[in-house]
Image (cartoon, rainbow, N blue to C red):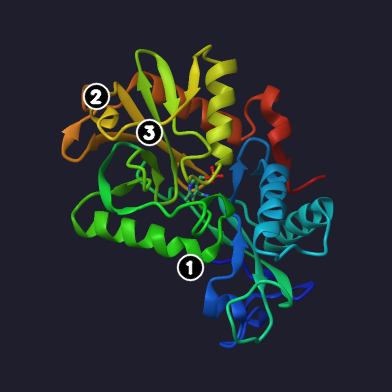
Amino acid sequence: MDHGDWAYFEGQIVSIQEAKISVMTHAFNYGTAVFEGIRGYWNEDHENLYIFRLQEHIDRMLRNSNILMVRPKLSLTEIQDIIIELTAKNGFREDTYIRPVCYKSEHELGPRLHDVASDLVIYEIRLGDYVNISGLKVAVSSWRRLRDNAIPARCKATGAYVNSALAATEAKMEGFDEAVFLGEDGTVSEGSAENLFLVQNGVLITPPVTADILTGITRNTIIELARNELGLDVVERPVGRTELYVSDEMFFCGTGAQVAPVVEVDRRPIGTGKLGDVTITLQKLYFDVVQGKIEKYRHWCTPVYDR
Ligand code: PMP
């Protein structure tokens, strides 16, 4: 990985070589950690790096850390300040990915959450596109999305990503770019690391927060931009599998995936089988917003330099 030289570990910023956990760490053995994925976008004209929706990511992490009882002792503002300081120290002048992890740090046997100390680690890498953003061919997975009452997808627990890895691996080994999860009830949930949207007759449709999805910050961004900038109706409702095949357009979205059009599902072309107009318009708007090019949405972009 093309990582930054500095990380936050055990309460301080240290060199990445020093940020090491033991084989006995609880989170390593049981997947007991909650993490975030945040992007920083380099704006060449402003000569600044903008961290996208930093506050919302930390807020989500703190809420989720409650589920796994890994809540850091630091406040939202303190964590934000640490991330800004760390990112400035890494000195990135290109697109960046920031990974905070709240984890069970004690060397303890037994899969429990109470009585086990936790800690916060943050590291950063340079990151361009995580998936191809010019037309994905995807497949419905034979793996089902894990349920809220088994391992909550909502909580972004590291252990839950075994479910994502199984689906993504199956899809890629079968020659597809990505997987679409159905929930145990058979309705559409999300991708392995992305939320998804359909366009049907000019209306944007996405599975609801009860469809065993991670409640994505990009998903929320897309809903706001579609409503406020494009005047589109957005509906959050259960989505049937075959709706994927009959929609006009489909796209994935997420911090990593950004806005990634899907042109084929299960070897069936979606709409024309080419990039759709609504998706392309939203993708362009999204990139302008995250790069801090649109004043109205600059409050979502935290500058790292010259503060
Ligand atoms: N679903 C899953 C399973 C994910 O891992 C991600 C990426 N964090 C998303 C959805 C998208 O969430 P966000 O837009 O907050 O990055």
x, y (%) of residue 113?
A: 66, 71
Q: Give the foreground label among 3 and 2.
A: 2
> Marks 1 and 3: CB-CB under 8 Å?
no
User: Label 1 is placed on what type of residue?
Assistant: Met
In the rendered image, which residue does mark 1 sit on?
A: 1
User: Label 2 is placed on what type of residue?
Assistant: Val
Disc 1 and disc 3: Cα gap in Å? 27 Å
Apparent side of residue 147 relative to residue 246 in the rendered image (left or right): right
User: Label 3 is placed on what type of residue?
Assistant: Phe
Label 1 neighbour load within 10 Å: few <14, some 14-19, many 20+:
few
Label 3 neighbour load within 10 Å: few <14, some 14-19, many 20+:
many
x, y (%) of residue 162?
A: 42, 65
Q: Residue at x 59, y 24 (%)?
A: 224
Apparent side of residue 84 relative to residue 226 in the rendered image (left or right): right
Disc 1 and disc 2: Cα gap in Å? 39 Å
Q: Earlier in the sequence, mark 1 or mark 3?
A: 1
Q: Earlier in the sequence, mark 3 or mark 2?
A: 2
Q: Residue at x 82, y 45 (%)?
A: 307
Disc 3 and disc 2: Cα gap in Å? 14 Å
